[in-house]
Image: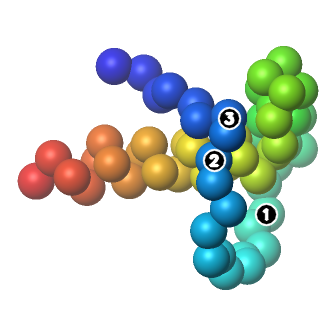
Amino acid sequence: MGIKLDYNKKKVTAGYKTIYLRNDIIEAIDKIAEENNTSFNNIIVNMVEYCLKENFNNN
């Protein structure tokens, strides 16, 4: 099953981290965000949550 993006995430208490990504990755994520009328950050959070769920909850 593929990732299902949640475009209307509720605000929660959160921290701040800086990450460095290749420009081609940034451009691809920006395109996904624009096509889905959401933020770059929301796409990243959804992708990370999906990967964590898929890879660490199956033990």
* Residue name at image x 50 percent, y 27 percent: 4
Residue lying furthest left: 59
Q: Find the distance from the CA under tag 2 to the CA under tag 1.
A: 24 Å
Colour scheme of this structure image?
rainbow
| Picture quadrant where residue 8 is located | top right
Residue 34: mark in rendering: none
Type of amino acid under label 2? Lys
Closest to the observer: 56 or 20? Answer: 56
Instruction: Give the amino acid at mark 3.
Output: Tyr
* One can see residue 31 in this view: no
| Amino acid type at image mark 1 | Tyr
> What percent of the width, then of the height, locates residue 9?
63, 47
The percent position of residue 28, horizontal first and vertical second, equals: 80, 30
Relative to 20, residue 14 above or below: below
Q: Nearer the viewer, residue 39 or 56?
A: 39
Which label is found at residue 20? 1
Q: Residues within 10 Å of mark 1 (few under 14, many from 20)?
A: few
Q: Nearer the viewer, residue 12 or 47?
A: 12
